[in-house]
Image: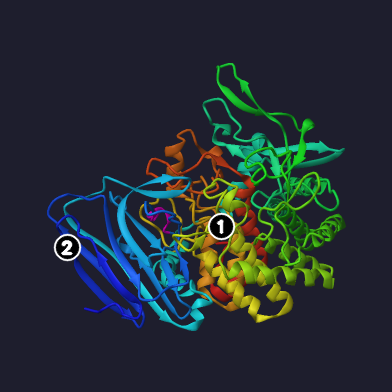
Amino acid sequence: MAQLPDAYVKRWDYDQLGSAAPKLSLKQIDKGTYHCIMTFELDQEIRQDDWQLRLEPAFQPYFHWAPHITPTSRHVMDQHSFRSPALIAHDGTRLLTLIPDLDLIAKDADARWYLDLDAPNNQFVLGMSRTRVSDHVLFEKVEGAAYSPGTFCIGFYLMTLEDDQAALNPWRPVLQFLWERWGHSRLRQGIHDRAPLKHYVKHAYDWAFRHWKDTVWQEFEWNGLKVGAPVFIADVSQSPNYPGVPNERESRSIWNQAWFSSLRSAQGLYRYGKKQDDPELVRKARLMKELALAAPQRSGFFPAVIATEMKRVMMVEGQEVNRSGSWDHAFWGNSNRNPADPWGSIAEAPYHVLDMSWTALLMLRWHDEIEPDPRLMEYAVRYADALLALQDEKGYFPAWLDQETLAPLDILRESPETSLSVTFLLKLHDMRPDPTYLETAVRALEVVVNEIVKSGRWEDFETYWSCCSYGREELPGCKVVRNNMFKQCNFSMFWTAEALFQMYKTTGEMRYLTLGTRVLDEMLMTQASWQPPYLYVDVLGGFGVMNCDGEWNDARQSLFAELILQYGVELDQPEYIERGVAALQASFAMMYCPENIKTKQQWERAYPFFNEKDYGFMMENYGHDGDVGEDGRGMGTFTIFDWGNGAAAEAYLRIKAHLGQTLKDRYGYDITH
């Protein structure tokens, strides 16, 4: 039997199950990879709250990575967080990685697998226990795990590598291993089984503009100008089939924000309308553009949200529900996912530089790719001139501006949100060359590389001011000590990988592509590299959000897919091509429609009143609260057109326009079939 190398492993030990010791199989499968399986033969049921394998590296790492955070010893990284699961440590030359043997995880086992990383005590843990969710979403061990009589196995792979380059990108060996072992074959099989993506696109637009049109489509006048857009959010109770009283989840509004971008969705709708020779859809897309242009600029800055007031009203049946007011009394504001007043007032929310840079970038893309409109360029230039004045001495752009004074707020003044402004300035420089735009973008990207990329400080608005508030007060700018990691969100990884790619394309400097690949790979560690048997919808290729949350198949994958493919084409990297295709396919995995057999079944278990009029309905993610079940738990309650079905449709149409022929000719992926 092989031995784990002393240069990497100082000691390792494991528990018994009851009085049963495991039979150990340890094999070296290549130069630096070891495979261990522990087999227990149980002649009776064993009740044991916790089982652990503990491994101590033979060196003192300065870098650690894990799929989730465990701020105390009672916390674990439950298998619900096993998208691309690994524990990673390196000291600059030696890289040690533990990967659970995913083939051995059972669907309905009473004890759930988990990982843990205790950085101060230099310990990796692979364990089994029951768990519960706390703090949206952390996992804690609880009592009561049981093991049935019979044969039971648990195992892991251990990867060792001594290479100075490993410190530059510690995720690449892990991603390659995971994809080759689990992702590649599953994707190839799924391609043959899956319906053409264009079918899902049709469902999305039929849902929004035919079956649910009375709820979704909003058209009104603003300052004498006709504008329109799909509503921000639609609840299951607003289905035409719902047997009860409809309820609005949030105030009727339309957003041009980093998640929920009406102007992004409009570009997909325009492309689709032109392809289908449907002038009404093209008209609606143009109304969405007009709404974006209607946002009033103040010193170059502009709001992200137009909203109506919402009130609680008593219905005839005696039920209280939410009802929004008329667009005649609408008002402009900003995202209420912010530190000034989390989930508070849209009207009083601060300006978000990220949202403005994203919308201005989309304006340039419309002008460049969809149809010329000089107003879009003029609007973006006014914003760019204001943005330049915000850059600090280091090179950062602030995250938020006080609504009254336009002064930067202190929170996240130095964050990777800066990267999206870099991409905007590079696009503007490409369309209207100006050395000031390029010089400003270079300064901004350099500080992000030096202070964010190297430390892994991926803190953005979503990290603390969305659903997961854990650490909101004490963690910004600080690591979770027990894991030697920041609380991280992959959104800012995406913006930075995109900015680095665009800087490489603008300057031709290879170092930007190399750095971008590193950031892309860190982002890909939040992508599902396999299909867990304990999840009830297809998730391969879908993305999570952060290392303290529960989502699978989050809607951001439709935004990420093109960038992954761009890196794949530039580097001629088949794995990236496959991961990008998988991300695009996963963008439609949550849609209620006959093409998604498993998902359709889950929707109907959650909401038995669903029928063909609901085809196209699509929750933004799966398992948001860290809990799923065969009974439909984990399916959610709403659709956001701009962060769900409409966004997925836009991604498909954009990728088809930009990369469709290349994917077909060079890599054999015809995304239209």
109 left or right of 367? left
Residue lying at 68% horizontally and 76% vertically, measured from the top left: 504
Give the Cα separation between the discs numbered 1 and 2. Answer: 40 Å
Quarter placement of the N terminus: bottom left
Q: Is residue 527 above or below residue 265?
A: below
Identify the mark nearer the N-term, 1 or 2.
2
Packing grade of label 1 (10 A; few <14, some 14-19, many >=20) is many
Packing grade of label 2 (10 A; few <14, some 14-19, many >=20) is some
Q: Amino acid at mark 1?
A: Cys
Quarter placement of the C terminus: bottom right
Q: Exactly how many numbered labels are in the figure? A: 2
Residue 412 placement: quadrant: bottom right
Magenta-tinted stretch: 76-82
58 left or right of 268? left
Q: Position of residue 389 (x, y in %)?
A: 82, 61
As rendered, which of 673 and 593 lies closer to the eye? 593
As rendered, which of 265 and 458 lies closer to the eye? 458
The residue beneath circle 2 is: 21
Asked if the residues shown at circle 1 and circle 2 are in contact, with their CB atoms under 8 angstroms apart, the answer is: no
Residue 80 belongs to the span the image colors magenta: yes
Q: Amino acid at mark 2?
A: Ala
